[in-house]
Amino acid sequence: MTSRATSGSRASHLTLLERLELVFVKIGVLPPLLLLAIIVFSQMSDNFLDIENFENVLRQNTFLIIVSLGQMIVLLTGGFDLSVGTGTALVSVVTATVMADSYNAGAGSVGFAIALGMVVGVLAGAGVGLFNGIGVSVFRVSPFIMTLGTSSIALGLALYMTSGVPVRGMPPKFADIFGFGEWAGLATPIWVTAAVVVIMTVVLNWTRLGRYFYAIGGNANAATLSGVTVRTNLTAAYVIAGALMGLSSVLLTARLETGEANIGVSLPLQSIAACVIGGVSLRGGIGRVSSAVLGALFIGLVQNGMNLARIQSYLQMIVLGGLLIIAVIADLIRQRSLSRLAAAGILG
Amino acid sequence: MTASGTSQRFPSNSAADGGLLLKLTEVTKRYPGVSALSNVSFDLRSGEVHVLFGENGAGKSTLISILSGAQRPTSGTMTFRGAEVEFSSVADAREFGISAVFQEFSLVPTMTVADNLLLGSEPLRGRLLNRRGLRSAAEDLLADLEFPIKANQVVGRLSRAQQQMVEIAKAFRSDLQVLILDEPTASLTETESGRLFELVEEARARGIGVVYITHRLGEVKRLADRVTVLRDGHYVGTLAREEATEDRLINLMTGRVIDQVFPDLTHNPGEIALRATGLTTRTRSAVDVSFEVRAGEIVGFAGLVGSGKGESARACFGAEPLLHGSVHLHGDEVTGSSPRRMLKSGMFYVPPDRKSDGLLLMRGVRENIALPSIRLAQFSKLTLMRRAAEKRITDEVAQRVELQPHSLERPVEQFSGGNQQKVLLARALVRDVDVFVFDEPTVGVDVGTRVAIYQLMADLCESGAAILMVSSDLPEILHLAHRAYVFHRGRIVEQLVAPNITEENVLRNFLDREVA
């Protein structure tokens, strides 16, 4: 691999291979993959490039985008969250139960029941995050074990609450507005997602909290010596990830019109894959809002393309797992190129 | 190899040429922006101990990493027993019988001594591990070297000295020709060091060539057949055993034109800014340490690595847990405050290891410089960042430290070591600080950056700041400090005031004389 290692500064006369390498280092893994996917699927299906289809992809992937944004924040701090899948199930069940009970008890208006269910749902998500955050930051459990354990707890709770039976009885208006509603020609979940994207952009780029996430993942020792209270801010990262997962689950519950304990299974893999493909570093400290959003959209496009091309869902799972691994390998190669090019003085 | 290959720079009698083991000619190693080694030549004969002597950053470590195959030279040639060689890995060099014992051990702490010793060349019976053979091979090796270690002990439970013995035994596993030791006594007790010296002498008697890195004069006297001195990556000279007097060595090691490196300093001590009384850290790395630093003076902490000087400074900043003692900042007790509170009270600590404790390597310069100060009103209001102001302020500071290239958004890891160090220091210039702690401020930087850093410290001092400088680099203490505390084995053993801070006075406490 390194046998061709260059030495000294020679930015002026690069070989074609080095130029390609430089481009790859600068743009990352996603653009080439995206281009490849678009070429392949537009060949396999006539509808793939339609505007309508694209809006479809956007709407179907709002859930993944929101969860991936939360996942990214945790990745930025150098951890990851495996509990976003069963957490989604737990929140769905909690939301549906609270909303249905409040609605059927007739205590307040329909609007009140909907609002209560949604707020409790998001708070339940944040609670799952708080549990993860305390484990990781106070007791220093590795994020892998902590969120894996939480994942089992959340699923157990969801199944225990419902015995596996879907929760019905929510006011139809909930689904009408948040599941199938439209505003100014776009589906409600798309508007909610847009709002989340804007808020997260502000948090990560324009607040101290965002800066602390990058600092903790970048170098926790340096952050402590710079006066950052790592414990609090690390917990906050998991709480935000949990709350976003909660919000996504509430929207998904509206779409499904029932509270389900068997949803979200593929979310941990998909959200991590979305972030990594989009360029979020698994070692922490690197990632942007656009990385998570575009990564999630890419996964959505691939799934959509495979659906249009009538590829079986089992085969789709194989493709997604493979994509995740390929993205990680490509990123490692990119890191190696980056340090080599920097050492050779080629990077400007 | 040709007869003319022996450079006349070496005081060698050409009759000994038959015993020549290793020879480096005009070796250069460049990193982005820095030359770690420039045209250094070095040779090693069998049955000799050749000491590499020099300050931190002189290029000793780079040289041995090339000898041991851990790094490749940018240019220059290496011959082994007269034939030109090129090592692409440590394993490659080991094939030739060249083994290095670095300060960082390459042992698996959860495995036993025997498993570690034969890792990678385990004896087999058929296709299965021959566990008994492995155990007895390891026991033979340890017995041969007379190491008092049991083969079935788990490495992680051994003392550092014992782990070092395992590491050395590992080097003896194969047919050893060249043994490279990198400051092997850095963390050993007197007795353990004594045992190590015997071992080195045994190795010499067996005809092995030993490359020995140290900056302790006592060890040079005890062990060296020849001494090669490096300074700032350059070859300074090679002395035979008889020529290697203390004076000569210190002169060669530090002998640059001092006036061009160190700025003139005025000394106007004011109020006591920082006072520590009876500090003992929880790890007992510092014991009963008391000192004070006044506004407008530079106080030096001298001592070897691991003498407790850095820990004492960290403890003041709240970065090292304390067992006893108190810290006062401008007369107010701040014992046990968090780094965050200490920053707020006007103290700033610049850590010695920029990679592990100082910088967010993958983030840009702007974010790194701003991080310790972003709670200040000029950087953020409530929680919102004021990015335009942030950019302006960090830009000014980057100019002040002469960052090269002046690129605020470039990830710190893409800068040279010297410029990374500038970013590290620049962080201290953004906020109002009246007590600075610089812990090893010039580790691994080139002379140009050194000069800039010293000038910066002088400016800060003249503008009335109190400066505490922790340094293993003797000239820094000699030329910058108005007062110096000398640390040895966790305690302050001497306090010196300006005209009396001399090499002799510091070194007297600083080096293990008992060794000689």
Image (tube, coloured by chain):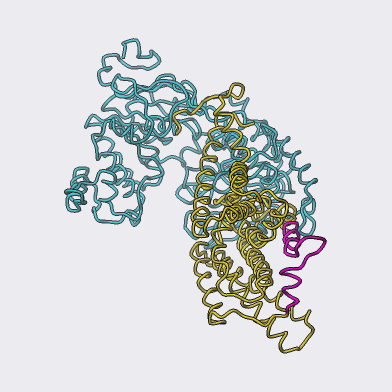
Chain colours: A yellow, B cyan
Residue B311 can be seen in this image: yes
Magenta stretch: helix, strand or loop mostly = helix
Indicate the position of residue B412 as horizontal and vertical percent values.
Answer: 62, 40
Is A174 inside the magenta-drawn segment? yes
Q: Is residue B270 above or below residue A251?
A: above
Q: Tell me if residue A225 can be seen.
A: no
Q: Which residues are magenta?
A: A172-199
Task: Quarter of the image for the C terminus of chain A: give it.
Answer: top right
Q: Residue furthest front?
A: A46
In the visual, does A59 lie left or right of B319?
right
Q: Quadrant of the N terminus of chain A?
A: top left
Residue B383, position in %: x, y?
A: 76, 58
Most foreground residue, A291 or B4? A291
| B441 up-or-down from B59: above or below | below
- Quadrant in which residue B105 is drawn: top left
- How many marks the image carries: the answer is 0
Queried whether the magenta region covers residue B220, the answer comes back as: no
Above or below B375: residue A155: below
B10 vs B475, left or right, is left
Most distant residue in the right direction: A184
Please state which of residues A21 and B441 is positioned toward the viewer in this rendering. Answer: A21
Residue B193 lies in quadrant:
top left
| Residue B323 screen position, x and y as percent | 52, 63
- Residue at position x 32%, y 44% in the image: B167
- Residue B254 screen position, x and y as percent: 51, 28
Q: Nearer the viewer, residue A188 or B133?
A: A188
Single out the residue that lies furthest toward the top: B4
Q: Residue at x 57, y 62 (%)?
A: A267
